[in-house]
Image (tube, rainbow, N blue to C red):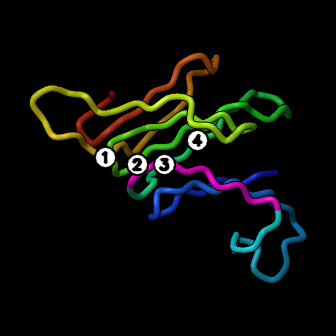
Amino acid sequence: DRMVTGHYDGSVRLSPVSTQQGPHPFDINGLSGTRIFKGHDNAVLCVKMEDTGSTVEGKWMMTAGEDATARLFDIASGACVRVYRDTREGTNAAAINGVDFSSRGDRVVGGTRFGIL
């Protein structure tokens, strides 16, 4: 099993999780195998891993943050392969606070307090 967490420094951490973590199972500091994904300039507000609908782990992870971007990461390589921005005309860019994958996994969606991107 894996746990993904967004942080105020703009990073995302993907950690292996087991029932044998020890006395503090939700403390991810020092977990062996933790991978760090970087790219956001501010706090990460939302993370979503692709759900394949089976026991096979997904290839993609979406993140969204206060920097008004959503980012698509390839989990295996750790590379950010696409950056989506709040590009509505006539307004300041807003933090993106939600992301998701379509049920087929071929599209992504993001939202701000003003609506869908």
- Mark 3 sits on what residue? 46
Q: In percent of the image, x 56 and y 22: which residue is there?
A: 102
Contact, mark 2 vs mark 3 (Cβ under 8 Å): yes
Q: Is residue 35 left or right of residue 41?
A: right
Q: Which residue is mark 1?
A: 95
Q: Is residue 34 above or below residue 82?
A: below
Count of numbered marks: 4
Classify the position of the C terminus by image quarter: top left
Label 2 – label 4 distance at C-alpha? 12 Å
**Image coordinates for residue 86, horizontal then vertical, percent:** 29, 33
Q: Residue, x 49% and y 37% (percent of image)?
A: 71
Residue range (magenta): 33-41
Residue 117 included in the magenta stretch of the image: no
Question: For the residue marked with disc 4, what is the amino acid?
Answer: Lys
Work out how far the residue at label 4 is from the one at label 3, CA to CA, in angstroms.
7 Å
Q: Are marks 4 and 3 in contact (CB under 8 Å)?
A: yes
The three-letter code of the residue at mark 1 reads Ala
Marks 4 and 1, the one that precedes in the sequence: 4
Per the rendering, the mark at residue 65 is 2
Q: Quadrant of residue 87?
A: top left
Residue named by callout 4:
48
Q: Determine whether label 2 and label 1 are within 8 Å by CB.
A: yes
Could you tell me residue 92's position as x and y percent? 16, 40
Question: How far apart in space, not on screen, are marks 4 and 1 (Cα)?
Answer: 16 Å
Rendered view: 52 above or below 63: above
Along the polypeptide, which appears first: circle 2 or circle 1? 2
Which label is found at residue 11?
A: none
Secondary structure category for the residue under label 3: strand
Circle 2 SS class:
strand
Q: Main secondary structure of the magenta part?
A: loop
Q: Amino acid at mark 3?
A: Cys
